[in-house]
Amino acid sequence: MSRPTVAIINRQALRDNLALADSLAPASKSMPMVKANAYGHGALEVCKALQNAPAFGVACIEEAVELRSAGIEQPILLLEGTFSADEVQVAAENNLWLMVENEAQKQAVLTSSSTQAVKVWLGIDTGMHRLGFQPNDISQHYQALRASSKVAKTIVLATHFACADDLENPATTEQTNSFHRCLSLNNISAGENTEISLANSAAILGWPETHRNWQRPGYMIYGNSPFSVAHENADQLTPVMTFQSAVISLRQVNVGEPVGYTANWKAPRPSTIATVTVGYGDGYPRQAPNGTPVLINGVRCPLVGRVSMDMITVDVTDLNQVAIGDKATLWGPDLPVNEVAEHCDTIGYELLTRMPSRVPRNYVN
Ligand SMILES: *Cc1c(COP(=O)(O)O)cnc(C)c1O
């Protein structure tokens, strides 16, 4: 007795994908990114499944405190640092690590009333121009933090890549060079008490020269490739989520008869239409056009007609057998979310992340 629409989350795949990140950079520590409810997969369950991970990354203190309150014990890095000064003390008390990306965040740490030191990651803007200090004057910030009793002994210097998913793009090498130029100009050397973190998923998989003390895998942990082309490392990932539903109605339509809202699709031949109980209210993208693949009993069939809030319609004319209750897969190991996203002019990251709580997550393995 329940709607058959579910996201099945394969915990073994999570562990395998993290193991791949570790094996590609054996000298680095991998900190899984679990922001935005672990890219839609359920942050608490993902952290529990990855209990050997040395730390986790989230976007804000609310996400971190929720995990801490639920019993997650590893350090948790706040990737955007603090939004207000009072967060520093909460962070220090809860073993949350702070990205420090600007003067206000730095001052909040230095003037905090906390008696416990907080671990700081110092963000350097090497070319993405979104967050981080300018490379030229990093020394003063680093020294001020280093000298403060409010700051834990080991400081991590970090940057973030804008274009690492494009393996032809020289920007990643330029950013890496700029990072190291910044360190040498400022007489900072990595080593004891100074660690480095550069790589996101794409850099872990495709840019080995960016591997340093810490890597920050996100999308790859969930088993999807950050690249739009085949890649020997990325192709070893296993998609973690299977977004699944079922056929709830079948009908024949004649040539010229429309299907769905706005009647934007009309049958070009006598057709069998399967109605599946999943829609944009479940995170299936409304912009999915006619022809977007849906697996019915494991066979690719084209979406036809507009996506409704709670239903979609699929052309199953070419299937030999289809019955009410048959399985429909929206994405998963046999239909990459990247492929669905491409039809919809977006990226798999968005489709996963915006999946609403109406879709139950079923954890297996
Ligand atoms: C989200 C995030 C990552 C992970 O990016 P992926 O492309 O999902 O691997 C890494 N670093 C920072 C700073 C992030 O915000």
Image (cartoon, rainbow, N blue to C red):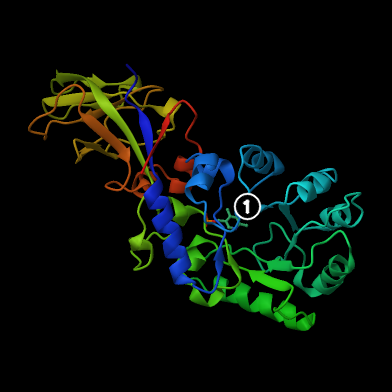
Q: Quadrant of the N terminus?
A: top left
Across the whole image, how many numbered discs are drawn on residues? 1
- Residue at figure coordinates x 60%, y 66% from the top left: 214
Q: Nearer the viewer, residue 10 or 245?
A: 10
Q: Is residue 166 visible?
A: no
Vertical comparison of 358 with 28: above or below: above
Q: Give the secondary structure at mark 1.
A: loop
Q: Where in the image, quadrant-wise, is ligand 1 located? A: bottom right
Q: Is mark 1 within 8 Å of ligand 1?
A: no
Q: Quadrant of the C terminus?
A: top left
Which image quarter: residue 269? top left
Q: Is residue 96 visible?
A: yes
With 205 as the anchor, is 90 left or right in this view? right
With 258 as the anchor, is 365 left or right in this view? right
Residue 254 in the image, given as x and y percentages of width and height: 13, 20
Residue 285 in the image, given as x and y percentages of width and height: 41, 34
Residue 237 in the image, given as x and y percentages of width and height: 37, 58
Vertical comparison of 273 with 300: above or below: above
With 291 as the anchor, is 72 left or right in this view? right
- Residue at figure coordinates x 45%, y 70% from the top left: 24
Which image quarter: residue 326? top left
Residue picked out by circle 1: 74
Q: Nearer the viewer, residue 172 or 34?
A: 34
Residue 112 in the image, given as x and y percentages of width and height: 89, 51
Q: Nearer the viewer, residue 290 or 95?
A: 95
Three-letter amino acid code at the position of disc 1? Gln
- Residue at figure coordinates x 54%, y 40% from the top left: 44
- Residue at figure coordinates x 47%, y 35% from the top left: 355
Vertical comparison of 187 with 196: above or below: below
Q: Nearer the viewer, residue 6 or 70?
A: 70
Q: Which residue is the extreme one toward the left?
A: 320
With 328 as the anchor, is 77 left or right in this view? right
